Image (cartoon, rainbow, N blue to C red):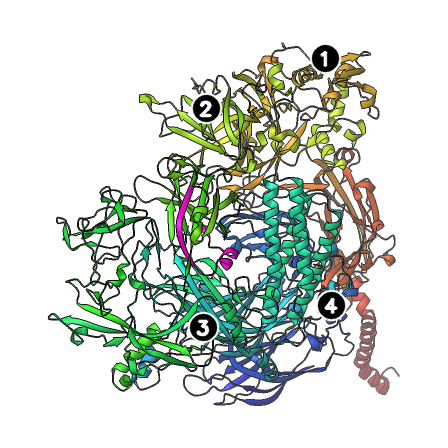
Amino acid sequence: MLRVAVESAAGLPKKKLGSPDPITSVVFKDEKKKTKSISNEVNPVWNETLEFDLKGVPLDSSSYIDVFVKDYETLGKDKLIGSAKVSLKDLASSQVKSLPVKNLALVDENGKNIGGTISMVIGYEPPAGAMTNPQDQQDGSMAGNTAGGEEGDVTDAGVPGAVTSPGEPGQKLRSRTRKRHNLANKPQDFQIRVRVIEGRQLPGNNIKPVVKVHVCGETHRTRIRKGNNPYFDEMFFFNINMLPSELFDEVISFRVYNSSSFRSDCLMGEFKLDIGYIYDEPAHCIMKKWVLLSDPDDSSSGAKGYIKVSMFVVGTGDEPPMERKEEDSDKDDVESNLLLPAGIALRWVTLKLKVFRAEDLPQMDDSITQSIKEAFGGQENKKNLVDPFVEAWFAGKKLCTKIIEKNANPEWNQQLNLQVKFPSMCERIKLSVFDWDRLTGNDAIGTTFLDLSKIASSGGEVEGETGESEMGFLPTFGPCYISLYGSLREFSGLPDSYDDLNLGKGEGAAYRGRILVELSTKLDGKADTSVEEIPSDDILVVQKYQRRRKYCLCAVFHSATMIQEPGEPIQFEVSIGNYGNKMDLTCKPLASTTQYTCAVFDGNNYYYLPWGNTKPVVSITSFWEDINHRLDSLNIILYISNRLQTNLNILKSAVLSKATNARLEEIWLKLINQLMEDISSIKIPDLEGKPNLTTLDIQIKKLRDSALKSIMEGAKHLFEEATDVNNCLSIIEGWLDKLKQLAEEPQNSMPDVIIWMLRGEKRVAYTRIPAYQVLYSSYCEQACGQYCGKTQTVFMQYPMDIKKGLKIPVQIRVNMWLGLATEEKKFNHYAEGIFNVFAELYENQAQVLGKWGTTGLLNRSKFSDVTGKVKLKHEYFMPPVGWEWEGDWSVDPEKNLLTEADAGHTEFVDEVYENETRFPGGEWKIAAVPYTDVNGEKLLGPTEIECPPGWKWEDNWTFDGNRAVDEKGWEYGVTIPPDDKPKSWVAAEKMYHVHRRRRMIRPRKRIPGVKTTTDKKDIGDAEGWEYSSLIGWKFHRQQRSSDTFRRRRWRRKMAPADRVGASAIFKLEGALGVDMESKGDEKGTQTEASVKQFGANTPTVSCTFDRSNAYHLRVYVYQGRNLIALDKDSFSDPYVHVSFLHHSQTTETIKCTLNPTWDQTLIFKNVEIYGDPQSLAQNPPRVVMEIFDSDQVGKDEMLGRSTCVPLVKLNPGMDESPKLLWEPVMHKNAPAGEVLVAAELILKTKESDTELPLAPPKRGEKLYMVPQGVRPVVQLTAIEVLAWGLRNMKTYQLAPVTSPCLVVECGGERVQTAVIKNMKKCPNFQGNVLLLKVLLPKEEMYAPPIVLKVIDHRPFGRKPVVGQCTICTLEEFRCDPYVTVAEVAMSSKVSLMAAGPRDLHVNIDDGRQQLLEAQEKETVDWWSKFYASVGESEKCRPYLDKGYDKLEVYKHELENVKEFMGLTDFCKTFKLQRGKNESDDDDPAVVGEFKGSFKVYPLPDDPGVAPPPRQFRELPDSVSQECVVRIYIVQAIDLQPKDNNGKCDPYIKISLGKKSVDDRDNYIPYTLNPVFGRMFEMTCFLPQDKDLKIAVYDFDLLSRDEKVGETVIDLENRFLSYFGSYCGLAQTYCISGPNQWRDQNKPSQILEHHARLKGLSPPRSEDNGNTLSFGGRLYCLSDFEANQKIHEHLGPPSERIALHVLRTQGLVPEHVETRTLYSSFQPTLPQGKLQMWVDIFPKSLGPPGPPFDISPRKAKKYFLRVIVWNTTDVVLDETSITGENMSDVYVKGWMPGMEENKQKTDVHYRSLDGDGNFNWRFVFGFEYLPAEQLCLVSKKEHFWNLDKSEFRIPPKLIVQIWDNDKFSLDDYLGAIELDLHHLINPSKTPEKCDLRMVPDGTTHPKSDQFKSLFDQKSVRGWWPCYMDKDGKRELGGKVEMTLEIVNEKEADERPAGKGRDEPNMNPKLDPPKRPETSFFWFSNPCKTCKFIVWRRFKWLFIGLIVLILVLLFIGILLYSLPNYISMKIVKPFN
């Protein structure tokens, strides 16, 4: 009995009108009971008990009840308020008798929490005699089967997360994500292949399972199979194009459905897995693993069977692994192949995620409702316009907290219980905070991830340690805040263009609040509810983790340079969290922004902010939790790893530049010693007594300590034992990786520091700097952040930059310090310069009628802030607490907005914009303001501008055409009022344009030694006024006639009252004051609004440096390589902009090259830098090089950007010279070549002008070259070029390339070949060898590339470049010229041409011979040889016994076999490219190929010495040859499916030159692994037809055939290669038989030519050819053939020994290669593989030998004969009319895959004891491949299919026992599935036959339990049949059978009919001896009477007869009695 006592509910939601009338109904197994309703109540109390009768069935662990609370309606249907589900698992396991359920949360239909709860108590009495199910107590972890149960049962200790158990992420978790770094973060092609092999132990009876695989929105399903152990073996392909980061979070799900069930709940089980998990496995694949299916809805139900799958993720350039199709020996061992990290049982765990609260969430909703409230006098509250809730997502499960309306600092205090199988295959918990919207979709506020690999550990990380370090820990986290980042905080009603950032895609640009969470893991427990409230005790505990301390942040901006778009004045804002965000009013105003400054042109290319000696300072105070102990250890590890990284880089570059061993050793020793010293001297801080400690802190500390210890030991070990530096590199890189993994702090609750650049009031660019990098620590110096108190260079970036950093908004140098307020005095030690604090305001005046005054100011106040929008007054300024005034208000003009542009420059370009306007379509007229600057400010015209004193003009005024302008330099735009100039400009003129301008420029140069006038800024207005024509930003010094507005700045200095030193600035909190009077009047709101908009008026802080240092900078730009091509002619015209701080210069432009050598020194003579030279030397500013492609027309395009660190010399006398290094060039975040540069920065002292290094040599008037000592040392070098020919040249400008020649350039030298006369006839060059003499650097790393250009000779003298190729490294071509090159690259084959044709065939015309061969063909074919070679010996026994040849089966292309050098030993193939890559694809178009090779060697310096011998001599003729090509296609593997059914109908198509062969008629239907076995013979001319293309197509009847993929073989390389790849060498020389010799030359001839090629004397054979001397060695035939069988096919000994010797020479053997197929649809992904080989025979050598026959093997016909003798113990399923139990038994049987050939016995009626007698024969014919042990089934899948599909399935027999019913469906009683290869041994007697004979997957079968019927031929005995009931097996009966397998021949000799039909023999079956009682009542009335009626009613009948007789007797008696009596009385006869 189950009793549910429904007590009460609470907090039900109200209705729109009034309260609900709640009523509760409880549903258990489709039975429903209700309480009464309670009217009008939101907290109803029922106290009713509902009882459910269990009908004698005990509860099991999957039982549950559903509780529904509804609103009772008298009319109509009750409305659902909320529902809940309660699992009865604990009751079922009989651990408790009653289960109190308190405050169970109710959810609505969508699973959203409604806020209400219900309480009840459930009681349970198990039915009498019910056993508790022991499996249920184990929580179904694997149906009671933990793999290795010993470790499976770990009790839960008290500390959360202190347990380690097998439920840990396997070792994989931590060492995972490493493999993903090299994937570019852009959408790319991936292919996911999933192979579903088979299922095991699927639940249910007589099921028809089907598997659906779902990946990335695409679903594929297998075919439907039958039975509980189905065999599918189907492969699915999913082609995907997406970002790798998104793909790895996608999930693959496998769902198994029962297709015979129409119900919706026919899902039997499912399994899910992250794609990223597979990608991180070795080779990105999971091979043949079993996955455990579970019920997705009920976590506790245990295993629902297994399926075996293989999964691959194939990315660009990945090689998919080969699946070996061999028999799985571990087929039955499910556990060891279960898909889990090693040796671990899957356990259910609950990830308990406590979500406490959030803070600082941004406004997300419109404030319309708020403004309405305000209108009615309510208080406006913008801050809380957000309705947040948290959503947690993990492994496909999603849970949400409740929604808290209108609260930016919500407290949820809820726990989300995520139920998952652990160790999980998913790696990240995604936490998103959403803003709930009533009407529209919810908006994301921010997203963050908890990476399990960082908050859990399997303990396997630290090797060699025992004890504690082995222990891992379960996921644990916090309590700790996690920060959210995303789009800008400012709310606007418009759609947010950066919305994706809030979903966690891309780097968030702004802080958006943070959430306080805690995660703990509970093993094995099942949470009652998925969302529950956190008890108040826990909330109190977490209070201590929210204790804040005050932190101070100071940032000094040293420079802001490389600004590309000036415009309005610029300011920077620094914020940490919400502190300092000037547009957010929730925090105190802080001095968090710099002053506005206008950008100034730097005279060359960029603009910069002219701060001079007054640097802006920002100071912010903020409050955060004290997590210094975490960040200290983080910084220490970063410090160690940074030092290691630096030393490793030095070591690597030393290895690259081939430094001496002694130098390498010195660097290496320094590296090891520093590492050991760092680890031993700097200890990670202890955690004792630290605040905010969490479990994770302790665990990470352990992990870090043990890892550092192991690195230390490794370092000691290396130090003592290492020998080779190169071998150590990988070990050291491993340490570095480990350190980088340790340097991740998941619990970092301090938000990043974000710096924003604002132009005017618009946020333009940002950068995020993690707080720990600038954090000060008192623990030790190394625990301070990397940049704490140091100046760092930062490139800011645009939010969500589409161009990926193509343009830099600004480069800043900033010095930041962040520390606890208690340690602020320490800041004084770091601060440089003098800090000043001022209050400032502006006095405004307007000019009305020629008079200046305040009357015309309109909406401006008399005194305001710099923006003019906030009204201020002198009187209302109050200094902040702790500060006081120093001095009085004074006028102090702002110099920063007005400096002179040419300060500090020797050369300068003046610019003026000339403006013209018109009415649309009219004439252009001079504009009202004809000449302006770039911002539209009025300037003098070019004719009026005078050259300033001290300068001289260099050139006349010209217009600047290097921009997006037309040919006259104009750019056009449309002016939209109120603007006075267009917002954007275009180069092409349109009718509607009304404004145009052009930039006029004129360079001038400073005259050395002449003083320029003192700065103009002193002229200006005596009273400090600055003027403007309109009220706006743009002010100037001198008054002009058009000015109508003026202002001047007043400032007043402040000083700290009680502090000394820079740290006083941290006291500046709060605003200085605003106009308070206007609060009362209506303007008040406006003032407030303006404060809101622009931040309050905070004091300005600046840092003044009393002196600057002058530096001299030299940048040596030597050369570039591999730049990207941006011009149509395949080249670029590169030049470099070099910027250093606010100086920039440009190199010269080098035309038409991707590998420019600039060889230029750029000298910056006077660079002013403020600050201490020592600190500058430690952290110098970067030199930035931007490479551009110069274009005649339009704007120069960027080719990439690179930076380099200058070598700083504080003493000019230092003799160290900078070393040129290759710096990587980046373009859109992708590598785009390299530049070879160096730079030195020299401090100039007063007297040191003379000491500066000498000026470098000049080239031309202005260009300095790179001086000696810096430039590479060169040597005269010879480059020999073998120019063999051009191939596959594509057309150029629609005309074919007909007369090309080749130009080779290297190091400034060039050489040209002769022109090819006729490309069609012979595309080879005449006179193939060229020689270049070049000065090349001695160091390989500086070597310039070789550039090849193909020039076509066209009519009219045109010579366009039609293709080019760059060969970067010369290393592989270097050689020693004096080593005699006997391997003259003379092709063995071509030299064979000289030999005349000889006949080879030795025909023995002997009839006996032919007979033998015919017999042999039966058993020995080519496939035997193939199988023997791949090791599948069972498929080729007779072949192996004869000891014939094997061949090599290569797993990849022949070109990829290492020994054969890619078959490019004669000449290599270089791809020629052309043109600009229009689309940003990785590779520009390939337009042809160049065949050739190079040899590079040094020449003697002394011209008198004879040059070394030439390398390329004795070349083969470069004429064309006619050849016969034989292409053997063996089989294809894993083709990409092209049909909807997930299959393909492949056939082969071959094209060679202009010929093609199409084998469409021989397509193979429905397969992905077709066995072709085809040979094609073609003729061709080499080299013209060198490319052999073999394609696999998919046959389609109606539509066009699709190409699956193709592979291309370069026949010319094979033909010319010295490795003899034209025809592989067999193992033995046979003149007949299956391995007959097929080459045109005999082995002895080939050996002779091989000797000539190697320069050896020809081979001599002696002793009748049994010995052979070659190359100075003597070879004996007996040595080679010592243990070989000598068979009749072998040729003469002299040839055999020649072949054996040849096989020792490393030539290509007889082989099959596996070639990957590619298609244009996914060019980078393999589409399958093709096993094949090619033979090439030149016709000039005569006919080749006979080809092999490789036709595929055919399946053989077999018959399975099953004789069903008897059954016994069959379940009696029915009750007859007469009441006895009986069954009408019959037996049904079939072989899976051949269901249409089902056979039944006759019926044994009325079996009363379960016995049945049949003597019935089933005969099943089947096609069988003995070699593969599989049945071949051919059948049409659907009636509409054209072809039969072929399936290969294991031979099995299914036998079922049924009960026959005439008028209803037959009843199923039991079945058994027999695998004919692993046949269960039957028992001899029925008594011994039981279910233990059938393995159930939990116990391992003994090896002798199974036999193969194919070996035994025949077997007889008893087998049990069973059926599943509720997951358990029940015996349904036993059947006695004889199983026999016969082949076709035996079947003819010993025929046997089906059933008992003729021929009834072998053995003869007698009719069954059934008892008389066996008959069918309907057809046998007599027997029915005899056996049913008589038997049953015998006594009734006898009784009736007796009764009738008695009655008759009595009747007669009664009848005759009166007569008799009357006679007696009357006695008439007497």
Q: Is 1468 a magenta residue?
A: no
Q: On residue 620, which mark appears?
A: 3
Q: Residues within 10 Å of mark 2 (few under 14, many from 20)?
A: some
Of residues 1543 and 158, the one drawn nearer to the viewer in this rendering: 158
Q: Is residue 1614 placed above or below 1404 in the rendered structure?
A: below
Q: How many marks?
A: 4
Between discs 4 and 1, the one toward the N terminus: 1
- Position of the C terminus by quadrant: bottom right
Q: Is 1175 a magenta residue?
A: yes
Residue 810 is left or right of residue 1797, and the answer is left
Residue 1753 seen: yes
Give the image location of residue 814, x and y in percent.
45, 62
Return the residue at label 1: 1403
Between discs 4 and 3, the one toward the N terminus: 3
Mark 4 to mark 1: distance in Å? 85 Å
- Secondary structure under the numbered disc 1 in the rendered image: loop
Residue 1826 is left or right of residue 363, and the answer is right
Return the residue at label 4: 1777
Give, as a single range, the part of the protein colored magenta: 1161-1184
Between discs 2 and 1, the one toward the N terminus: 2
Q: On residue 1311, which mark appears?
A: 2
Between discs 2 and 4, the one toward the N terminus: 2
Of residues 554 and 1301, the one drawn nearer to the viewer in this rendering: 554
Q: Residues within 10 Å of mark 3 (few under 14, many from 20)?
A: many
Give the image location of residue 1970, x and y in percent.
82, 54
Residue mark closest to the camera, 4 vs 3: 3
Residue contact between numbered discs 4 and 3, judged by CB atoms under 8 Å: no
Of residues 361 and 1575, the one drawn nearer to the viewer in this rendering: 361
Residue mark closest to the camera, 1 vs 3: 3
